[in-house]
Image (cartoon, rainbow, N blue to C red):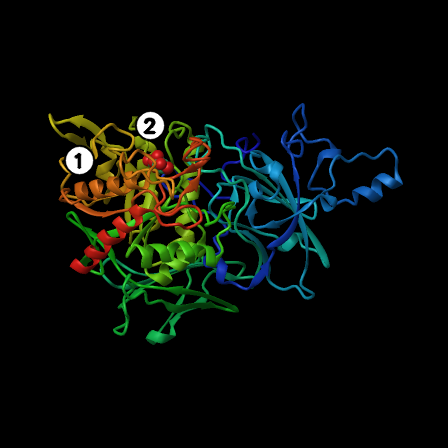
């Protein structure tokens, strides 16, 4: 599709040197807390399965009658002049409500995978001053944006934010925004076409018009360093970014520090952490109002402060060893017809099941960056987060464009979220078979993480080799990438995808490097909520799943370096590859709760286990 040709570096990210992590522009850190106009609500939509609005059928520019972004009154022009032809008319096309995936917007779109056009108008502020950005929380997968008939930019990647400066293209009165979103994955995209989740095409997170002064705080990162100092990095953008006075304030802590940006608009400072600082932890998720001022601009965020490190096989939070009592989740809300639009309420319903229901302190946000709504809520509720990019299964390891895509989305993810205390682990990949090309690719991503954020741990969910030890399975981690990681993570499904008897699992032998923490980033078994089979405990019964959890937790207890787990998965989620008509009906049923929130028996097994572990501390 058009998604691939010429779409790389769509954010304007520069990859000048191979060793520099790409830096998307603008960053607009903490954009969700900036003043702006929410463009959520009704938008017109129109399908374009042959991408006629992107290229003519013989290549080149589309015919003028197919140029969807045109700012024309189709009806009036055709009525006036009988030679005029338009084969679209977005302002008279049906309406739907954004954000949401188109899969739920009309029954005939349930399996649509391709290019979709969206359009709406908004009124310019009566008095315009400073700069205006059009900021998308996420659009899946490749996006092209026009304002008043002119292209403002493109972006690739379904789960990270992007923004365009539209100051110069805005006009008085009504402005027309047209957005083409193409959901189709190819061998070269990230993720590639085959995954185990629904590909929710469309604009799945809010679109906002954000106003800033001409020179504004584009990025600010305030954190504790590994040795417990307070550090700040600020980047200004605009005509007066250089040699500009800036100020960091955390009023509740009496912190007030002034500085001056350098010629590039950067200010960096390190200082002693204030005495009164209460460190963020799952038990006490304290957040502070942080302000950075520069000229007319006032940047703010709510930030928690903590340290996270590895010492030998231990993970230390604020200097103390911690066990991660977690679970994995997809970005998919409860209900029979989810559309991947995470409202605060939808996110809270899921995270509170982890925190209160399971006695958890950890969540793996699989398999891509989740909404900022969810990450902020994890900050607030006190859940430690594993955040990852969709480098999943069979990626085109040797394709430099694919690598650039992955690097750009990783950078966008980290730059959006590195002020979130909840995030402890950045993961660069999931279940990727070992090859030389893959090792080079993933080591590049690990290097990028370390350059962008030296305060967190790096991991990847790895594959493990299964062998026989006579009467017990022998699981060996022989992945050369393990060297590059702080935390090793393994997905294990013995007893579900293998013929192992659950009663043998506890005797499994784990051969893993002993000098680093290990996490079970996944284990799980399907069960259809309400299907009981106490006598035979066949697969898909609640009893089988509960037994599987007991057995796997028993196995986990015998792995000396295990420091946490995020079983698969909190909630049943849509997956087109799961078509057992009796039990799955298009859903991966490994949830501990069903799609409507019904708890399965295994929920109680894990809840009891975590409850007891939480007491042990
Ligand atoms: C895995 C994948 C996850 C799948 C899960 C499953 O290992 O990482 O995305 O959904 O297994 O259910 O098979």
Residue underneath mark 1:
503
Distance from the alpha carbon under mark 1 to that under mark 2? 39 Å
Q: In this view, does 606 lie above or below 577?
A: below
Q: Sequence-wise, which precedes: disc 1 or disc 2? A: 2
- Residue at (31, 38) in percent of width and height: 533
Spot occupied by residue 8 in the image (x, y as percentages of width and height): 50, 36
- Report if residue 489 is visible in the image: no
* Residue that protrudes farthest toward the front in the picture: 535
Spot occupied by residue 247 in the image (x, y as percentages of width and height): 41, 69
Instruction: Give neighbour class at mark 2: few <14, some 14-19, many 20+ (Cα, 10 Å).
Output: few
Spot occupied by residue 74 in the image (x, y as percentages of width and height): 79, 42
Spot occupied by residue 223 in the image (x, y as percentages of width and height): 32, 61
In terms of image quadrants, where is residue 260?
A: bottom left
In terms of image quadrants, where is residue 383?
A: bottom left
Residue underneath mark 2:
437
| Closer to the camera in the image, 232 or 284 | 284
Q: In this view, does 556 lie to the left or right of 26?
A: left
- Report if residue 390 is visible in the image: yes
Q: In this view, does 338 lie above or below 219?
A: above
Q: Is residue 198 above or below residue 305?
A: above
Q: Is residue 603 left or right of residue 160?
A: left
């Amino acid at each position: 599709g058009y998604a691939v040709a010429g779409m790389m570096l769509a954010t304007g990210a520069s990859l000048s040197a191979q060793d520099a992590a790409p830096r998307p522009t603008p960053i607009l850190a903490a954009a969700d807390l900036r003043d702006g106009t929410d463009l959520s609500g009704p938008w017109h939509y129109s399908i374009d399965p042959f991408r006629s609005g992107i290229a003519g059928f013989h290549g080149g520019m589309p015919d003028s009658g197919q140029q969807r972004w045109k700012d024309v009154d189709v009806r009036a022009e055709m009525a006036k002049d009988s030679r005029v032809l338009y084969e679209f008319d977005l302002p008279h096309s049906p309406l739907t409500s954004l954000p949401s995936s188109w899969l739920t917007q009309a029954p005939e779109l349930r399996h649509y995978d391709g290019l979709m056009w969206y359009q709406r108008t908004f009124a310019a502020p009566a008095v315009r001053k400073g700069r205006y950005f059009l900021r998308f929380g996420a659009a899946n997968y490749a996006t092209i944006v026009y304002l008043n008939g002119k292209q403002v930019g493109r972006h690739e990647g379904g789960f990270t934010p992007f923004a365009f400066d539209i100051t110069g293209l805005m006009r008085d009165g009504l402005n027309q925004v047209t957005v083409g979103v193409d959901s189709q994955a190819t061998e070269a995209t990230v993720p590639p076409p085959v995954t185990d989740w629904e590909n929710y095409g469309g604009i799945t997170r809010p679109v906002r018009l954000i106003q800033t002064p001409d020179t504004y705080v584009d990025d600010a990162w305030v954190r504790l360093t590994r040795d417990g100092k307070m550090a700040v990095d600020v980047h200004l953008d605009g005509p007066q970014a250089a040699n500009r006075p800036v100020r960091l304030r955390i009023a509740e802590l009496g912190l007030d520090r002034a500085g001056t940006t350098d010629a590039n608009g950067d200010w960096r400072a390190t200082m002693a952490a204030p005495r009164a600082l209460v460190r963020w932890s799952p038990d006490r998720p304290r957040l502070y109002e942080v302000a950075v001022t520069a000229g007319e601009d006032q940047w703010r965020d709510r930030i928690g402060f903590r340290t996270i490190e590895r010492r030998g096989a231990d993970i230390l939070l604020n200097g103390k060893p911690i066990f991660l009592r977690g679970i994995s989740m997809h970005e998919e809300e409860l209900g029979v017809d989810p559309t991947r639009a995470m409202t605060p309420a939808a996110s809270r319903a899921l995270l509170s099941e982890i925190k209160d229901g399971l006695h958890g302190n950890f969540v793996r946000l699989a398999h891509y960056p989740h909404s900022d709504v969810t990450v902020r809520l994890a900050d607030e509720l006190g859940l430690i987060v594993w955040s990852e990019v969709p480098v999943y299964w069979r990626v085109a390891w040797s394709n430099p464009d694919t690598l650039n895509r992955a690097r750009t989305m990783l950078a966008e993810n980290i730059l959006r979220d590195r002020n979130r205390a909840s995030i402890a682990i950045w993961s660069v990949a999931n279940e990727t078979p070992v090859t030389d090309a893959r090792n080079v690719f993933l080591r590049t991503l690990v290097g990028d993480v370390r350059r962008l954020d030296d305060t967190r741990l790096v991991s990847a969910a790895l594959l493990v080799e299964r062998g026989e030890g006579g009467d017990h399975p022998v699981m060996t981690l022989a992945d050369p990438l393990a060297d590059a990681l702080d935390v090793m993570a393994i997905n294990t499904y013995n007893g579900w995808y293998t013929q192992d008897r659950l009663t043998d699992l506890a005797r499994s032998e784990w051969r893993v490097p002993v000098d680093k923490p290990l996490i079970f980033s996944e284990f799980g078994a399907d069960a259809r909520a309400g299907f009981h089979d106490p006598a035979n405990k066949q697969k898909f019964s609640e009893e089988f799943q509960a037994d599987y959890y007991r057995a796997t937790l028993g196995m986990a207890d015998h792995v000396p370096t295990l420091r946490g787990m995020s079983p698969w998965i909190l909630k049943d989620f849509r997956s087109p590859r799961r078509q057992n008509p009796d039990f799955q009906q298009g859903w991966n049923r490994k949830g501990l709760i069903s799609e409507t929130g019904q708890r399965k028996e295994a929920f109680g097994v894990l809840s009891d286990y975590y409850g007891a572990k939480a007491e042990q501390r």
